[in-house]
Image (cartoon, rainbow, N blue to C red):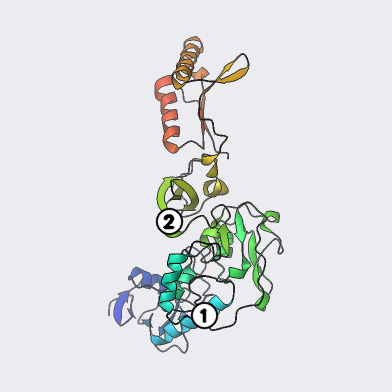
Amino acid sequence: MRDHAFTLNHHEASFTPGQTILEAAQAAGVYIPTLCHLKEATPTGACRICVVEVRGARSLVTACSTPVAEGLDVLTESPRVVAARKMTLELLLASGNHNCAACAPKDAADWTGFQLEAQQTEGTADLCPAWGDCRLQDLAYRYQVSGMRFEAPSKYPVPETVNPMVVRDFSRCILCGRCVQACNEVQVNRAISYGYRGSASRIVAAGDRPLSDSDCVFCGECVQACPVGALVDKKSRYRWRPWEVKRIRTTCPYCGVGCQQLLHVKDGRIVRVTGVEDAQPNRGRLCVKGRYGYDFIYSEERLKTPLIRDNGRFREAGWDEALDLVGARLAAIMNDHGPDAIAGVSCARSINEDSYQMQKLFRAVIGTNNIDHCART
């Protein structure tokens, strides 16, 4: 056996000291499902979905929080492991209002047929807003768990909708803790945490007050981390499904950091923005402007025609007239006072290519470095 090797599903696999079983398995191309695991955050093993069987261990262990060791013999899909994951999924589905296609009615004779029919007829707000973009649902499909074995709660909490950015629906929360870690360890805003105990446990902000009354800056990192429909972008809620959108990678225009974004575009309109994970410099992180400051594109108040001020009042003009006037005025100022008498400000709501052309015009043509950029929404 080679140095730093262990047995993974009856095959020898190498590992780097300090890796967990999950990390070593991923490096070897072996899939282990997770719900609570969040990259770059402390592993908690809270959801128990990533359990694996280790030969000689008395019980199943969580792959995300168990270090791999020399000579370890690990099974990731043994009958014992699959049975444990199925039980966990059934309990999670029964714990809240997971009204998705995974929860087939008790009288459904054909589970797979029910799922296919739901996919064809979906299109209403009766289903979860994360339907089709839910990791819990994906795992229920993978292990064919119906979620109807255990009795669901008789009453659900009322969703929190009092802020303009995020809908918090605790009836769908599985207490995986990814949102807490995203807030406290990734973005380090420390706006949310665990509250209460036992069956009353829930995610709280500012002593269990609405997000709008807390230290939340609405960066949306918790929404991107949520694996279910407990946290949803208010702007995009029920407006899209994953198969309806085209994802376009771009650079955020609001400041000079250069955060990488994914624009989710449906019918030619941006319906959602997410950070590009594993991409520098932001590694999936975005601020409130980068994640939610996009709907100005479709504002009816946008100027569509150049305006020229005559006698203190604006009048509409053609592009040729407007550009000739601007060119003549700039040339006159340069002749009288030099190029450094001119400065340009680019708007963050312009596309990146336009901002680049603007600075090129001022530096290469006009001859001044007096340029700035407004990163405000």
Sooner in the amino-acid sequence: mark 2 or mark 1: 1
Q: Amino acid at mark 2?
A: Glu
| Label 1 CA crowd tier, 10 Å (few <14, some 14–19, many 20+) | some
Extreme left residue here?
1
**Residue 26 x/y as whole percent:** 37, 70
Extreme top residue here?
336
Residue at 29% in and 78% down? 12
Q: Give the side of residue 301 with respect to residue 339, left or right.
A: right
**Residue 180 x/y as whole percent:** 59, 64
Residue at 49% in and 77% down? 104
The answer to whether the residues at label 2 and label 1 have Cβ atoms under 8 Å apart is no
Element marked by disc 1: helix
In the foreground, 122 or 172: 122
Q: Which residue is mark 2?
A: 244
Q: Is residue 18 visible?
A: no
Q: Is residue 216 visible?
A: yes
Residue 90 shows which numbered tag?
Answer: 1
Residue at 38% in and 81% down? 77
Split into 4 quadrants, where in the image is the N terminus?
bottom left
| Label 2 CA crowd tier, 10 Å (few <14, some 14–19, many 20+) | few
- Give the foreground label among 2 and 1: 2
Split into 4 quadrants, where in the image is the C terminus?
top right
Element marked by disc 2: helix
Residue at 51% in and 55% down? 239
**Residue 46 x/y as whole percent:** 54, 75
Q: Amino acid at mark 1?
A: Glu
In the foreground, 173 or 120: 120
Decide: is 19 above or below 182: below
**Residue 249 x/y as whole percent:** 41, 49
Q: Quadrant of residue 117?
A: bottom left
